[in-house]
Image (cartoon, helix red, strand yellow):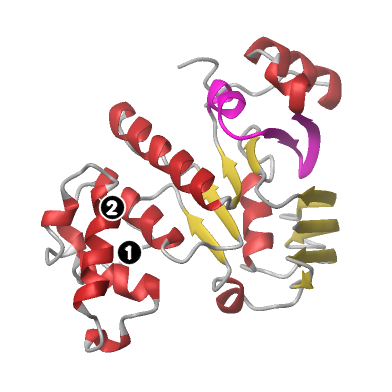
Amino acid sequence: MLKLSHISKTFNPGTVNEKKALTDLSLHLRQGDFVTIIGSNGAGKSTLFNAVAGSFFTDAGSIELGGRDITFQPEFKRARVIGRLFQDPMRGSAPGMTIEENLALAAGSGGWFSHMTKRDRERFRDRLALLEMGLEDRMRQPVGLLSGGQRQALTLLMATMVPPQLLLLDEHTAALDPGTAEKVLKITRQIVEENRITTMMVTHNMKQALDLGNRTLMMDSGKIVLDVSGEERAGMTVDDLLERFRAGAGKVLDNDRILLSD
């Protein structure tokens, strides 16, 4: 479904600030895979997402999505089939527009909002009710008045209003309080499973990385140093993950932000 073949990316090549962000990285995701990705700061997790989303072109290698080569496809075209959430809940929605206007844009039924029908509004209301945040009763309220958690939940809804081929979640609950983060993760799991959306999720919580999805990757220095799934993953603990990292990367994991438990 998603196929990365030997992709590499170096920033500021030939200068004192040269940084090899991705090095000969290959990865194949099947339809419906939900992959969690962990690693220290600077391991290349967000860079990998940027490469897939088209924020820049890779220096080498190829990227295929749904059997199509998108290696040199611009970001705005990839955005039609790739949904993405960022750590900052303020990104991904238009604060000066109402909740229903944001949803209309995401659903492709906006058209300056003159064509938004009663049926559209009913559909938006039903979808918002799934969040259990009361937003279905505030559809004409500007998004800028919502809390961070409400905006992130709305952005998740927007990114999946038309189910994308691929969903990228870049620490999308990291900036939320624990209770709200748990609720957003629950909604994430529900939406992904119901629509069988192929998903990649970056997290710094190693227990979360083992509990969610069906496959876990660990990155270091722009490479995938661990890829576990199936029975092997089902029986793993956080300590097992740490030990496998030490064996694969040949060093101790930088635990500055990694969470070992709930």
User: Residue at coordinates 64% horizontally, 37% vertically from top-left?
Assistant: 37
- The segment highlighted magenta reads 205-229
Quadrant occupied by the C terminus = top left
**Magenta stretch contains residue 200:** no
Please state which of residues 22 and 62 is positioned toward the viewer in this rendering: 62
Q: Where is residue 145 in the image (x, y as percent from the top left)?
A: 14, 56
Question: Is 220 placed left or right of 202 in the picture?
Answer: right
Q: Decide: few, some or many residues near mark 1? Use Cα within 10 Å; few <14, some 14-19, many ≥20.
A: many
Q: Decide: few, some or many residues near mark 2? Use Cα within 10 Å; few <14, some 14-19, many ≥20.
A: many
Give the number of the disc on residue 151. 2
In the rendered image of this protein, does residue 76 appear above or below residue 64? Answer: below
Where does label 1 land, which residue? Answer: 93
Amino acid on which the number 2 mark rests in the picture = Arg
In the rendered image of this protein, does residue 62 appear above or below residue 200? Answer: below
> Is tag 2's residue or tag 1's residue first in the polypeptide sequence?
1
Q: Position of residue 113 (x, y in %)?
A: 24, 84
